[in-house]
């Protein structure tokens, strides 16, 4: 399967990418010639990572009959100081809230996403140290 993303320059430092029929505007900070009209490209990698893993995890938990929870993710990345500036370490926080959530099923869903299903994770872990952490009701559990 081939994926095609079309990206057009909109002037200054602004670009519009068409992804699966949806437009994403990217722009730079004003200090770099942009107008701050969209996110920067590199943080969109983090959004792709959390979106990919999140879709896997929700799907897996549904199959495991886990219900009635609130789920959010945070991604924090530390960059190199030399050009090209890249993410050296990415820490993913998988946050769950709810009553009587089964840690074993949540742990399994996160592990399956990261080790088997999430292609974005598979690509990024080749370029950066990716660390995952799970919290259930604000208590960290072992991954």
Image (tube, helix red, strand yellow):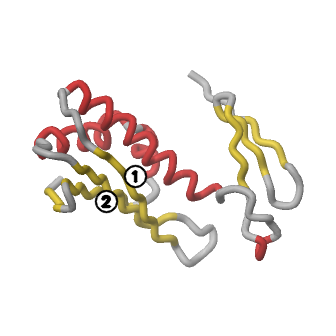
Query: Is residue 82 placed above or below 130 in the rendered structure?
Result: below
Q: Name the quarter where the N terminus is drawn.
A: top right
Contact between marks 1 and 2 (CB within 8 A): the answer is no
Position in image of residue 114 (x %, y %): 31, 43
- Tell me what residue is drawn at x 56 percent, y 58 percent: 43
| Residue ID for mark 1 | 125
Q: Nearer the viewer, residue 118 or 55?
A: 55
Picture quadrant of residue 130: bottom left
How many badges with numbers are in the image?
A: 2
Crowding at label 2, few (<14), some or many (≥20) Cα neighbours within 10 Å? some
Position in image of residue 4 (x %, y %): 67, 30
Query: Is residue 111 placed above or below 87 in the rendered structure?
Result: above
Position in image of residue 100 (x %, y %): 10, 44
Position in image of residue 56 (x %, y %): 35, 34
Crowding at label 1, few (<14), some or many (≥20) Cα neighbours within 10 Å? some
Query: Is residue 5 placed above or below 124 in the rendered structure?
Result: above
Nearer the camera: disc 1 or disc 2: 2
| Residue ID for mark 2 | 131
Q: Nearer the viewer, residue 31 or 123?
A: 31
């Amino acid at each position: 399967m081939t994926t095609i993303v079309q990206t057009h320059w909109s002037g200054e430092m602004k670009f519009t990418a068409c992804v699966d029929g949806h437009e994403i505007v990217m722009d730079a900070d004003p200090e770099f010639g942009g107008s701050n009209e969209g996110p920067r490209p590199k943080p969109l990698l983090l959004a792709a990572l959390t979106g990919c893993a999140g879709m896997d995890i929700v799907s897996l938990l549904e199959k495991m009959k886990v219900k009635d929870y609130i789920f959010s993710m945070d991604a924090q990345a530390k960059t190199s100081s030399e050009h090209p500036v890249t993410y050296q370490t990415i820490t993913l926080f998988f946050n769950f809230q709810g009553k009587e959530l089964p840690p074993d099923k949540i742990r399994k869903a996160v592990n399956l996403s990261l080790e088997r299903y999430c292609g974005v994770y598979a690509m990024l872990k080749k370029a950066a140290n990716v660390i995952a952490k799970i919290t259930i009701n604000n208590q960290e559990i072992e991954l």
